Amino acid sequence: MTVATGPQQAPSVLDEVTRLLLLEARLLDEERYEEWLGLLTEDVHYWVPGVENRLRSDPSGSYGPGRMAYFDDDLRMLRIRVARFASTAAWAEDPPTRHVHVVSNIEVEPAGDAPEEYVAHSVVVNFRSRGELGDDVLYARRRDRLRRVGHELRIARRRVLLGHNVLPAKNLNTFL
């Protein structure tokens, strides 16, 4: 795993953020979704925009609020998604998908506008397998806003930029 610090970053905060992101990956791999929800703040915003191929000169950019998104969720919607995984309505998850999340390139910097908040950048690779066929690999860059709640860091905002403009999977039954 590649770990880097910003110029003003104390190693203990970087270690804490790294532990949080690696714990999150393990909880997702083990389908411990209720515990995963506990890593999020009450006002979390989880956003995975669709990425469009646009020229550099296009002022609208490759993604943006109000445009297509795979996820544009608050905690209530994330709880609904988690509950769906446990229901018989999630036919695409029976048999369950096997996940492997790899998190790397972790960088942390102070949020600047809030003393106990940090911005964490990371790269995630999510390998997914179902049955004998149909393995998928998703690559993404994440930008998280982490907030201290009590003595622990929680994920308050997540932006996931997929490295794909066309989803290389039949579904997106995963959290990144």
Image: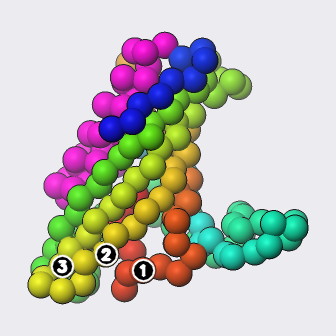
Q: Nearer the viewer, residue 34 or 96?
A: 96
Mark 2 Cα-neighbour bin, 10 Å: few <14, some 14–19, many ≥20: some
Report how many numbered discs are placed on residues in the image. Answer: 3
The magenta stretch is 10-37
- Amino acid carrying label 3: it is Arg
In-front residue for pair 164/37? 164
Question: Residue at the spot x=47%, y=28% of the render?
Answer: 4
Where does the N terminus fall, quadrant-wise?
top left
Mark sitting earlier along the chain (1/3): 3
| Residue positioned 81% across, 66% down in the render | 56
> Between marks 3 and 2, how big is the CA–CA gap?
9 Å
Element carrying mark 2: strand
- Residue 133 magenta: no
Residue 25 rendering spot, x and y as whole percentages: 29, 48
* In the image, residue 126 above or below residue 119: below
Res. 130 mark: 3
Residue 8 horizontal side relative to residue 101, left or right: right
Q: Which mark is residue 40?
A: none
Q: Residue at x 51, y 24 (%)?
A: 5
